Image (cartoon, grey):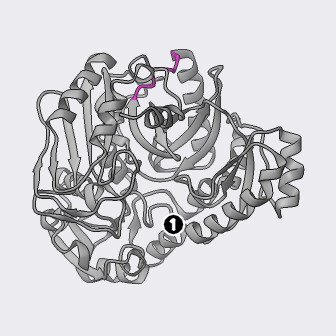
Amino acid sequence: MFKKILIANRGEIAMRVIRACRILGIRSVAIHSEADAGALHVRFADEAVCIGPAEAAKSYLNVPQIIAAAEVTGADAIHPGYGFLSENAHFADVCRKCRLTFIGPTPEAMRTWGDKVAAREAAVRFGLPLLPGTGVLKDAVEAVREADKIGYPVILKAAGGGGGRGMRVVRNADELGRAFDSATREASSAFKNPNIYLERYIEEPRHIEFQVLADQHGQVWTLGERECSLQRRHQKVVEEAPSPSMTNDRRIRMSDIVRHAMRETAYTTLGTLEFLMDEGGELYFMEMNTRLQVEHPVTEMVTGVDVVEQQIRAAAGERLRLPDTRPWSFRGHAIECRINAEDPRTFTPWPGLITEYHAPGGGGVRVDSGVYGGWRVPSAYDALLAKVITHGATRAEAIARMRCALDEFVIGGIRTNIPLHQALLREPEVIEGRMSTRTIERVIARGF
């Protein structure tokens, strides 16, 4: 087992990894920018190193500085969290060359699954169902030709990234040229990779993802699925497990296909395969995230598995000891709401001083947070402040607990999206489990 882990991240995910390190008896090293000098993860880690100014490119994305911090503190592994360098194969390569364990998949696996076009090719080989689509498009002319074959509407996607960047929905050929140029520019800026491909677009899809855990001894588990349909501009807002739209037969079938794909590519540690579900209930592989997900707590709540602890154990070469349950036996239902520093209606970021902070509590309530009263939320980073997770014997009980928790959550001095969450949990589509990725835009259009 590792003696010391450097956490190449910030905020609530850095706090989450620190907790896992403490459980395992591992010392932790926090890195931070000048803007994060007083951050919670800096306070709670065993050691902390400032690696640069607020700008992420000069701090949390600065590979030489991160490696230097690991070497000067004597860390033997690096946990990347999510975002920043978590899916950067080059960073994983550098860690390997510097004899630091990257707590994640191998660089080779990251390249296979991290590039969306390469992932589609792998999906074909291993029997994962796919929407009609293309490889990398040379130009807008080819895009028009391929879209005519697929049929409109189509969606342009960036091959080298996610999070909604480089994505454009196109409903006719007249729109495609401008959309292709716009998506290419955004993909190049966001991911340093201008490659774009096409897929058929589903009008009212649901977003379903399967959590994968694998060790270096050939063992692979799927820890059930999560429903992530409540999102805005491809950014998830609310997640839950298990999905209210999933049948047990489909869960078993997809779990077997996913495990086969992971074994065939010798994938290790954590990963998440994301699918779109069409109006008829069919699943289509979309992409794989080769890292820990923001929404991992709902899986932990319904399986009883600490996935971060198991991720660290797998990276250290341990043989994991988990039941081989097909599918996983869920323990009730869990829901997660992402609490962001932003206007709940316009989604404008809202940095500033948190004047008061009171987290909710009670049975079946968990809060993963990276902030506190008196902390000034910087403008340089993602708006995520905390995640509220509730668990109940039934979905209705988990929703009732979440309503109560949101009512109790006090964050003063800045605006947050708590009112949006409260509106969503009054929405019939959500209460009845009928939501799609279009639900939030309808709620916002009606007003709340």
**Residue 303 in view of the camera:** no
**Residue 192 shown left or right of residue 349 in the figure:** right
Where residue 407 sits in the image (x, y, percent)?
A: 18, 33
**Residue 330 shown left or right of residue 229 in the figure:** left
**Residue 376 shown left or right of residue 84 in the figure:** left
Q: Identify which residue, 342 or 149, lies in the foreground.
A: 342
Q: Is residue 98 above or below residue 331?
A: below
Q: Which amino acid type is shown beneath numbered disc 1? A: Asn
Q: Residue at x 20, y 42 (%)?
A: 367
Neighbour tally class for label 1: few under 14, some 14-19, many 20 plus, Cα within 10 Å: some
In the structure shown, which secondary structural element does the residue marked by tag 1 occupy? loop
Q: Residue at x 34, y 57 (%)?
A: 383
Q: Residue at x 49, y 50 (%)?
A: 268
Where residue 311 sits in the image (x, y, percent)?
A: 37, 50
> Circle 1 sits on which residue?
88
Q: Please give the range of residues in magenta.
A: 241-247
Task: Please give the count of numbered marks on the rendered protein.
Answer: 1
The answer to if 415 sits in the magenta stretch is: no
Which corner quadrant of the image does residue 86 belong to?
bottom left
Q: Is residue 285 above or below residue 279?
A: below
Q: Quadrant of the N terminus?
A: bottom left
